[in-house]
Image (cartoon, rainbow, N blue to C red):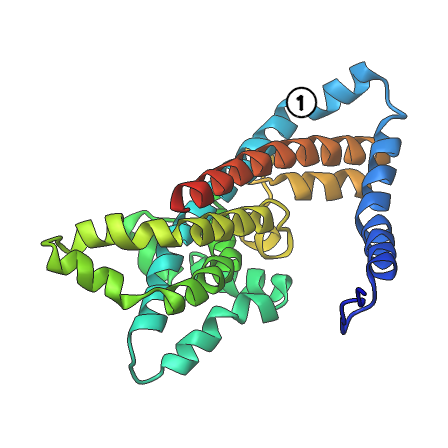
């Protein structure tokens, strides 16, 4: 006689129904509305909108700097997570709490704060200005903002994995004569690879759609520092709803392709680790 397995959560039927309704209302329905709105345009109009020089420049800036920011966050996020997990020092809890600051801080406030720091008259900007280095109102400023909002993803993904990493692996590698770099590349990094790729993907996805923290520090100069989300908002303010949805569909398609490739890397990393 078989007994139904006890579960604290609702059964499969109810849980599955709630899941599909939740995803349908919050994900599928808005995306479907965007696609339907864009379908009102002819193919020539759609292509002319998404391939205009201004749009292409915004794609290049948004996706290029998002990839660069995610890569920077993967490298330095690993370093921050390593220090927070492996070392004990005064102020460690404060440093750990500061990692979550980009999550709690409104993006517009972050953008204003970064602009105030890195503008030519800001605390940091005025020190860099004599050397000819400008951050605010340049693509470099956009990169700084994207790094700021993406760093928590890589740190929080890597911390639990580093905490669970068996120190005996490092000891065994050292006993076999491996140096520090050989131990890291051969014994530690393979175990961190899936979490590192996941943090990279999350940071990239967060950066691609970022608006609030970038809109202030970028300067919003078309063809130079204008990101795609800002171009979409500009078209909405001009009541060009079809053009805005066309750009949103193009950005969505590019994002899906890039995230699919990143997921393939994650699958390869997990399989290689296994």
Is residue 239 among the parts visible in the rendering? Answer: no
Of 196 and 55, nearer the camera is: 196
- Residue lying at 87% horizontally and 61% vertically, measured from the top left: 14
Q: Residue furthest top?
A: 44
* Residue 163 occupies quadrant: bottom left
- Residue lying at 73% horizontally and 36% vertically, measured from the top left: 248
Does residue 31 appear to the left or right of 257 in the view shown? right
- Residue lying at 26% horizontally and 53% vertically, measured from the top left: 187
Of 257 and 149, nearer the camera is: 257
Is residue 214 among the parts visible in the rendering? Answer: yes
Quick one: SS at disc 1? loop
- Residue lying at 48% horizontally and 77% vertically, measured from the top left: 97
Q: Quadrant of the N terminus?
A: bottom right
> Considering only vertical position in the picture, is 243 above or below 6?
above
Q: Which residue bears the numbered disc 1? A: 52
The x, y position of residue 152, in whole percent, is 50, 62
* Residue 79 occupies quadrant: bottom left
Q: Residue furthest bottom?
A: 90
Of 95 and 226, nearer the camera is: 95
> Considering only vertical position in the picture, is 208 above or below 165?
above
Q: Residue furthest left?
A: 177
> Considering only vertical position in the picture, is 271 above or below 82?
above
The x, y position of residue 176, in whole percent, is 12, 55
> Local crowd at mark 1 within 10 Å, few (<14), some, or many (≥20)?
few
> Considering only vertical position in the picture, is 23 above or below 236?
below
The x, y position of residue 84, in whole percent, is 36, 72
The x, y position of residue 182, in whole percent, is 18, 49
């Amino acid at each position: 006689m078989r007994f139904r397995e006890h579960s604290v959560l609702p059964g499969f039927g109810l849980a599955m129904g709630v899941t599909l309704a939740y995803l349908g209302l919050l994900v599928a329905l808005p995306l479907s509305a965007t696609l339907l709105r864009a379908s009102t345009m002819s193919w020539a109009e759609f292509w002319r909108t998404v391939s205009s020089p201004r749009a292409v420049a915004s794609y290049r800036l948004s996706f290029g700097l998002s990839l660069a920011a995610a890569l920077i966050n993967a490298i330095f996020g690993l370093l921050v997570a390593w220090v927070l997990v492996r070392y004990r020092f005064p102020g460690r809890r404060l440093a750990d709490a500061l990692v979550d600051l980009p999550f709690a801080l409104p993006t517009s406030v972050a953008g204003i704060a970064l602009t105030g720091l890195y503008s030519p008259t800001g605390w940091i900007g005025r020190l860099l200005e004599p050397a000819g280095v400008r951050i605010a109102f340049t693509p470099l400023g956009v990169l700084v903002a994207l790094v700021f909002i993406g760093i928590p993803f890589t740190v929080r993904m890597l911390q639990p994995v580093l905490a669970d990493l068996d120190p005996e692996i490092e000891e065994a590698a050292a006993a076999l004569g491996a140096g520090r770099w050989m131990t890291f590349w051969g014994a530690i990094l393979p175990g961190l690879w899936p979490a590192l790729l996941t943090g990279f993907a999350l940071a990239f996805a967060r950066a691609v759609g970022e608006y609030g923290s970038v809109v202030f520090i970028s300067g919003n100069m078309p063809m130079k520092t204008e990101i795609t989300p800002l171009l979409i908002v500009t078209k909405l303010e001009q009541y060009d709803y079809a053009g805005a949805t066309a750009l949103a569909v193009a950005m969505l398609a590019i994002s899906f392709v890039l995230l699919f490739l990143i997921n393939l890397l994650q699958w390869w990393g997990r399989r290689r680790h296994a």
